[in-house]
Image (tube, rainbow, N blue to C red):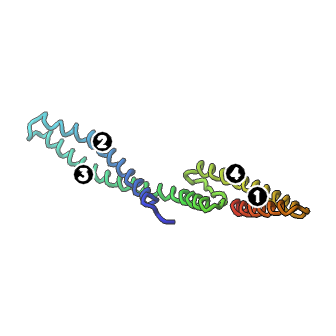
């Protein structure tokens, strides 16, 4: 299937970027909560005091430890976004195939649903709709067959020419309806 500009590729990018931005936002808030109180304590003593030197070493230690954790967290969240995308892509592709078949006038087989699939409720509803469409199509096909039998019986009767022409027109209309219903 052709990818549209806002198709699966765009969805994947949005999922990965969103996961990364969430972690970056959380990390920025955490950094503010950790580093701002520590930096604000610098003004309390003399610049050469042992307390300020120890505080500076502690801030540098946190700085060196904090940002690698942030980088790993961003990468891990982006990877989890990719995993989530892959888990969602299969059901979405199956849904797209069903929609394409319906657009072609076909009623596809029910969508198979695995226990781990996302969009399970949506697929259940679509399967119910497909079953209802199949039943309507079967009802229409049965009704068309009964009409066809009635027209054959009328055609077998000795009818005036005017009625015979009407029966022929009705049989043509019936043929068109059968093609549209798929019967």
Q: Position of residue 38 (x, y in %)?
A: 21, 39
Lower position in the chain sequence, tag 1 or tag 2: 2
Quarter of the image where one finds residue 156: bottom right
Q: Report the residue marked by disc 2.
A: 29
Q: Nearer the viewer, residue 80 or 178?
A: 178
Between the C-alphas of marks 3 and 2, the distance is 17 Å
Q: Is residue 149 above or below residue 27?
A: below
Residue that appears at 72% across and 56% down: 137
Q: Nearer the viewer, mark 4 or mark 1?
A: 1
Q: Residue sitting at 51 percent across and 66 percent down?
A: 1
Nearer-the-camera pick, 150 or 102: 150
Report, in whole angstroms, how far the alpha carbon at label 4 lies from the one at label 3. 62 Å
Residue 135 x, y percent position in the rendering: 73, 53
Sort mark 3 into few (<14), some (14-19) or many (20+) by Cα contacts within 10 Å.
few
Q: Left or right? Give the position of 139 relative to 54.
A: right
Asked whether the residues under the numbered discs 4 and 3 touch, taking CB atoms below 8 Å apart as contact, a structural biologist would say no
Q: Between tags 1 and 3, which lies in front?
A: 1
> CB of mark 3 within 8 Å of CB of mark 2?
no
* Crowding at mark 2 (Cα within 10 Å: few <14, some 14-19, many 20+): few
Q: Earlier in the sequence, mark 1 or mark 3?
A: 3
User: As drawn, which residue projects farthest toward the bottom?
Assistant: 1
From the viewer's perspective, tell me whether residue 59 is left or right of residue 171.
Answer: left
- Asked if disc 4 and disc 1 are in contact, CB closer than 8 Å, the reply is no
Front-most of 54 and 159?
159
Which residue occupies the extreme right position in the image?
A: 158
The circle on residue 64 is: 3
Residue at the spot of label 1? 141
């Amino acid at each position: 299937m052709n990818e549209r500009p806002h198709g699966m590729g765009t969805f994947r990018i949005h999922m990965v970027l969103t996961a990364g931005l969430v972690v970056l936002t959380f990390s920025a808030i955490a950094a503010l909560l950790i580093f701002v109180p520590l930096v604000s304590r610098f003004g309390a003593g003399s610049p050469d005091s042992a307390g300020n030197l120890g505080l500076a070493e502690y801030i540098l230690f946190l700085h060196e430890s904090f940002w690698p954790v942030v980088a790993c967290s961003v990468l891990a969240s982006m990877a989890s976004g990719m995993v989530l995308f892959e888990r969602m892509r299969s059901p979405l592709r199956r849904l797209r195939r069903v929609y394409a078949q319906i657009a072609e006038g076909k009623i596809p087989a029910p969508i198979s649903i695995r226990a781990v699939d996302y969009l399970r409720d949506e697929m259940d509803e679509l399967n119910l709709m497909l079953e209802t469409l199949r039943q309507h199509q079967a009802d229409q096909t049965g009704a068309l067959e009964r009409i066809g039998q009635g027209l054959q019986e009328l055609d077998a009767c000795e009818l005036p020419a005017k009625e015979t022409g009407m029966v022929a027109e009705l049989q043509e209309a019936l043929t068109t309806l059968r093609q549209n219903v798929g019967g």
